Image: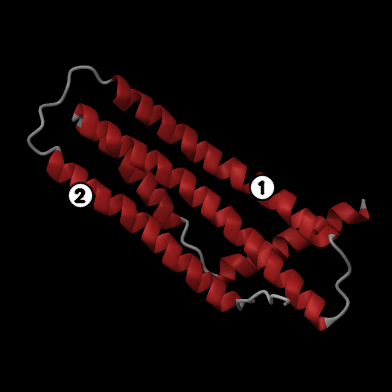
Amino acid sequence: MATQQVQMTTEQRARAMNIIWFSMILGVVVFAVIAGVQGQNQKPQEDMLLTMIGMGMAAFMFVVSLIVPNIVANQQFRATLQRGRYETDEEKKQAMNDLESVYMTKFLIGMALLEGGAFMNLVFYLVEGQILALIPVAILVALMIASRPSQAKLEAWIRNQMENYNLESQN
C-alpha cells in the first residue's frame, strides 16, 4: 500500500509556523511567570556563577541561532534541488513543498536555540534567585517575537535561495 505525502499550501505552512512560533514564545512566558511566582520570596544567592554562565550562554545561543539554521538549510536546499529534474507541474509542486519544508526546519532550529537559552536562564533564576538572570530571557523572547514567520518571508527566502543557487550554478 503506497502512502501519499500530504502537501500543505504555502499559506497553510505559514499558518502552522505561526502557531508553532506563538506556542514556543508562550511556553517561555508561562515558565517565566511560574519562575517569577516561585522566586518571589527567594533571597538571592551571593554567588552569581550560574547567572553569568546563563548570560554567556544566551549570547552564544543567539549567535548560534544565526549560523546553524542557515548551514542546515543550505545543505538541505542543495540536496533538494539536486534530487532530480523538475519538468512536470507535479514535480515543481513537490519541489516547492520540499523547499518550504527546508525553510520550516530552518525556522524551528533557530527558535529552539533561542527558546533553550531562555529556559536555561529561567532555571538559573530559580536556582540562584538573581533578577539579573531574567534580562537574557527578555532579550531572547524579544528576538523570538522579532522572528515571526510569514508567507511573504517564506516566499522571499525561497526566491533568494533560488537566485543564489542559480548564480552558483552558472559559475
Q: Position of residue 62 (x, y in %)?
A: 48, 40
- In the drawing, does residue 62 fall left or right of residue 8? left
Q: 33 left or right of 115?
A: left
User: In this figure, what is the number of numbered marks?
Assistant: 2
Q: Amino acid at mark 2?
A: Val
Q: Quadrant of residue 156?
A: bottom right
Cα distance between the residues tagged 2 and 1: 33 Å
Mark 2 neighbour class, 10 Å CA radius: few under 14, some 14 to 19, many 20 or more: few
How packed mark 1 is, by other alpha carbons closer than 10 Å (few <14, some 14-19, many 20 or more), is some
- Which residue is pictured at 18% across the width and 30% down the height? 129
* Residue corresponding to mark 2: 33
Point out residue 70 in the picture as x, y percentages from the top left corner.
64, 48
Which image quadrant is residue 99 in? bottom right
Q: Nearer the viewer, residue 141 or 5?
A: 5
Q: Does 161 sit above or below residue 113? A: below
User: Callout 1, which amino acid?
Assistant: Val
- Is 83 positioned to the left or the right of 46 in the image? right
Closer to the chain start, of discs 2 and 1, is 2
Specify the farthest residue to the left. Answer: 41
Q: Nearer the viewer, residue 139 or 33?
A: 33
| Residue at figure coordinates x 48%, y 44% from the top left | 113
Mark 1 = which residue?
A: 72
Question: Which residue appears farthest toward the bottom when viewing the image?
Answer: 89
